[in-house]
Image: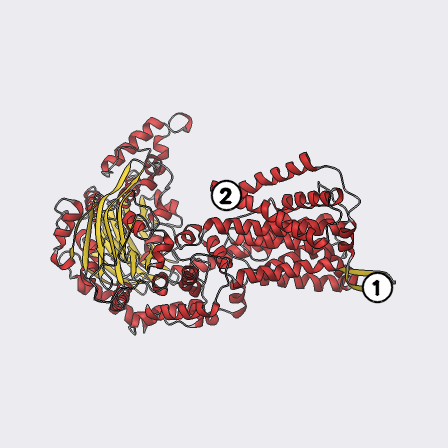
Amino acid sequence: MTTLHDDMDLKTAASQAAPARRPAATDLLQRRPELASLFLLVAICIAVAVVNPAFLQASSLVDMGRASVVTGLFALGVFAILAAGGIDVSFTAIAALTMYSLTLMVLTVAPWMPMSLILVLSIVSGAILGAINGLLVYGLGVPSLIVTIGTQYLFRGILLAFIGTVWLMELPPQMVAFGKASLFDFETANGAIITLPVYFLVFPAAAILTWLLFQRTLMGRAIFATGGNAEVAARLGYDQRLVHVFVFAYAGALAGLAGIVHVSANRMANPFDLVGSEIPVIAAVVLGGARITGGTGSVFGTVVGVLLITVVNNVLVLVGIPSTWQRVVVGSFILLAAAFFVTRQRQFHSESIK
Amino acid sequence: MSKLPGSDEPFLQLRGIHKRFGGVHALRGVDLTIRTGEAYHLLGENGCGKSTAIKIISGAYEPSDGEIVLDGRSRRALTPLMAMEAGIETVYQDLSLLPNLTVEENVALGEQLVGGKGRLLRGLDRRRLVETARRALTEVGLDPTPALMRTKVADLPLAIRQRVAIARAIACEARLVIMDEPTTSLTRHEVETLIEVVGRLRAQNVAVLFVTHKLEECYRIGGQAIVFRDGQSVAQAPIDSFSRSRLAELMTGRPIEAQRYRRAAPQPEILFRARGLSAGRHFEDVDITLRRGEILGITGLSDSGRNELSLALAGHLPLTAGELTIAGEKVRIARPADAIALGIGYVPEDRLSEGLFLEKSIYANETPLILDRIAGFLGLLDDRKGRAEARRISAEMQLNTDDIDLPVGALSGGNQQRVLIGRWLSIEPKLLILHGPTVGVDVGSKDTIYRAIQAMSERGIGLIIVSDDLPELLQNCDRIAVMNGGRIVDELRAEGADEDRLYQTMVASERDAAE
């Protein structure tokens, strides 16, 4: 087909696809918005390291590594749900219910249970609770925000009403051991030993698994398809019920796992814990380039978002900014990111008009 | 399951299909026969059951009664997956592309989905994805460069998107491709390309079923016409055996002649004058003169600047230069509210997303511009007055319902368009800009809309119709201006103007501008 019009169409398509016409950096940012957050992350790290070199010591890096695990697991789950066009605010309640019930069960009836089985159980029970979310969202046809606000209350209510309100200060020994197990030991200048725990590996492992899910399976594409346009995805034969149940169960599984990691790391199980910490997690995912309207984002971006939030939460103290200012900083970042994404979209629209 | 080529058995037959939605009997005994390698045109007014029939063929709806014979096997209903496995693919009017996925994914994911019987928990074969996409894109005449393949669909121009949608349809060995109003939003040269693609599909023994309102294109493509009326199939025969008026009569059940609607002449007084209008790179140095009661048509390819010009006149796009006068007085239009205050109305092309509140009632959609008039004591809205106004507007626009509380989303395209025009009539506009007034509207409703347009002009309203439907402009306008490359390149009297010459001007001038 070699008519003039065709050639022109192709040129238009190619020029919109190829970076040639725009500066490379702008184009890259348009396609990979998370790079802006990455840049911010690197800039903050450099700035803080210059002001206070203590930041680069093993102790603070390990602290941050530890702190990122639970947020990271939550964030990967939230990313999967955002990619499918939904939102979840119940994951902390799933984590709290799973971790407390499981810890209580191991303490009272199954002290023999090996740590590996505890971890598997946390994943399975988290997945079941998440699947309930998915079935409700699909079955009721109600926005997932409403459904998960409901289940957050429900799961937390069940925990506090039926399972317990007492802090468990004495954990089962296998969980204590899991929390302490060392991957690396560092000796600081003043002779103290800093430990990077084994459970730190859970976050990168989960990130790689999530990446494989999205890049290498049909389900990953189906999740994005649903987030892009659920009605169209259904029309094209993507089983919407399966996608909904899967994506919420996946987030639930990660939340359940995060719960047990949280307990093991803190060496106690507090039933009032975790719930209320949803917003920073969602903020991390959004800073990682996922749009709240669904269908976008990446695992890499989510990891960057988690690191950014973790760094901001941990380093401001090092440079003498009061911790109460963390919120101001995170809030400004989110607004900046939002403004950035909006201008990005407007630019696109004004170009596509012609 | 594959039949010998030349075997006489049809690929698909619908026999006595009925479909009821609650109390609505949408299909009342539909028969149709489809053979591979042939083109079909499903014709009929809006609401005649065309879309319902398509959804039954593609497996989205289950028929209430009747028989579907697919590849010689009789079935009561199809599922989307069954239809896809049999090679039935639908290019919906909205194209059903996923904006956030890449071209290659949009084209070729379906093949892997169908290959795995819809199971999702499977690995994704990237290499096959790329191969399939490359083959399908080539077949629709797109060059599958890596840059194009990895572009997100949201970043593509509309005409390319449509070909991507067709590429998706044929990516998994399609045997029947259904196209729902494929040319509605295409310019004429894009339509030519589409017709070429269809020819290629037929040569590969694929059947193509068009759902369309554009009879001209049906004759150009050829094949069989299937005519629906009131949920029944009333005819199926080679399209050349029907005259245009016979087809229109079959569709509406009443004779409709393709006459020139324009009878009245403009009044001498100049209503609106624009001098040297420019808006960035969209258009420049445009002059327009419009008399009271005059109808001016503006046409051009979709990138000619005609869309932006109409937006600018309505205050939706800022002007960078130029002078506007209304009834001799200099005016400025910077925002939509300025245009409305000056009595300039704008009926957008995409009435669904830009014009109507779909979930709101006819009443609410007809009265938003006259809230001050229906406001009573303390500025509270006087419901009785408002309802009376809405009833008056509905009657004037000849809506097919008396129920002004009906949500607009439940109306047919033609009736929705009339609601929108009626809204502007409520403020007695001086100038009304109609952008694609009959896009996606059936023959019968077109007639009503054209009559309404003529009636408005006789009341002294100046009208600008922006459209690429040349017969529409020729039938309704006093003058037609052809735009290209952001300029008006030709202007001629509509009466007796030659459609081919208009088209040549549009295309020829584009070629000049491209050089």
Q: Is residue B217 visible?
A: yes
Residue A188 tag number: 1
Q: Residue furthest right?
A: A191
Q: Which residue is mark 2?
A: A143
Residue B394 tag number: none
Would you place residue A20 above or below residue A211 in this image?
A: below
* Residue A24 percent coordinates (x, y): 52, 70
Find numbered disc 2 in the image and state the secondary structure of the residue it sits on: loop
Residue shown at the point (62%, 53%) measured from the top left: A75
* Amino acid at dot 2: Pro
Would you place residue A86 above or below residue B203 in this image?
A: above
Q: Residue furthest top?
A: B377
* Residue A154 percent coordinates (x, y): 60, 37
Would you place residue B78 above or below residue A33 in this image?
A: above
Left or right? Give the position of B415 relative to B60: left
**Count the marks: how many?**
2
Of the 4 image quadrants, the one containing the C terminus of chain B is: bottom left
Find numbered disc 1 in the image and state the secondary structure of the residue it sits on: loop
* Residue B276 percent coordinates (x, y): 32, 59
Left or right? Give the position of B246 relative to B410: left
Q: Earlier in the sequence, mark 2 or mark 1?
A: 2
Specify whether disc 2 shares its chain with disc 1: yes
Label 1 Cα crowd, 10 Å radius (few <14 / some 14-19 / many 20+): few
- Looking at the image, which is closer to me, B207 or B7? B7
Residue shown at the point (12%, 55%) measured from the top left: B242
